Amino acid sequence: MQKVSTKGALLAASAFATFAVMAAVSPSKAGPAPEPTFKAEKCYGVAASGQNDCASAGSNSCAGTATKASDPKAWIYVPAGTCTKIQGATLKAM
């Protein structure tokens, strides 16, 4: 029977834990954000860079890929009735 050092066992456990966490947080596929459970509307022109909820024609390809803040083609979900209260926001892509 071989004796395993505490340092070796700790290293192996750390490597396994790192792999498990990476597998859990890595997205399996890119795409639109899931529709929220609250009554929502798409609000254009207010998403922060990299924080959009879905694709926009000619601007980005999927959720989280907007390259500039306040892109008039990128949208986020907001509670219904909220978008028109935000300065610079619209309910339609510009």
Image (tube, grey):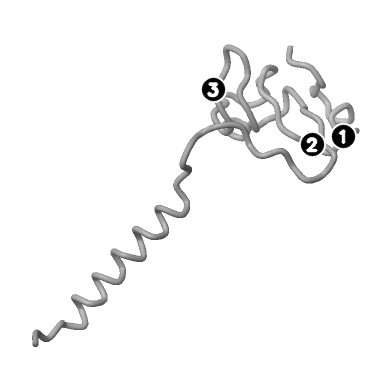
Q: Give the image quarter of residue 88.
A: top right
Q: Amino acid at mark 2?
A: Val
Q: Secondary structure at mark 2?
A: strand
Choose between 18 and 32: the one closer to the eye: 32
Upstream in sequence: badge 3 or badge 2: 3
Question: Residue 53's x, y, as percent?
Answer: 65, 33
Q: Which residue in the protein does label 1 denote? A: 82
Q: Residue at x 44, y 47 (%)?
A: 26
Q: Residue at x 72, y 28 (%)?
A: 46
Q: Indicate which disc residue 78 carries.
A: 2
- Viewport quadrant of the C terminus: top right
Whether the residues at callouts 1 and 2 have beta carbons within 8 Å, the answer is yes
Q: Badge 2 local density, few (<14 within 10 Å), some, or many (20+)? A: some
- Alpha carbons under labels 1 and 2: distance apart: 6 Å
Q: Residue at x 63, y 28 (%)?
A: 54
Q: Is residue 24 above or below residue 43?
A: below
- Viewport quadrant of the N terminus: bottom left
Question: Residue 76's x, y, as percent?
Answer: 71, 32
Q: Secondary structure at mark 1?
A: loop
Left or right placement of residue 68 versus residue 78 in this view: left
Q: Badge 1 local density, few (<14 within 10 Å), some, or many (20+)? A: some
Q: Which residue in the protein does label 3 denote? A: 61
Q: Amino acid at mark 1?
A: Thr
Question: Residue 42's x, y, as percent?
Answer: 77, 28
Choose between 72 and 13: the one closer to the eye: 13
Residue farthest front in this picture? 1
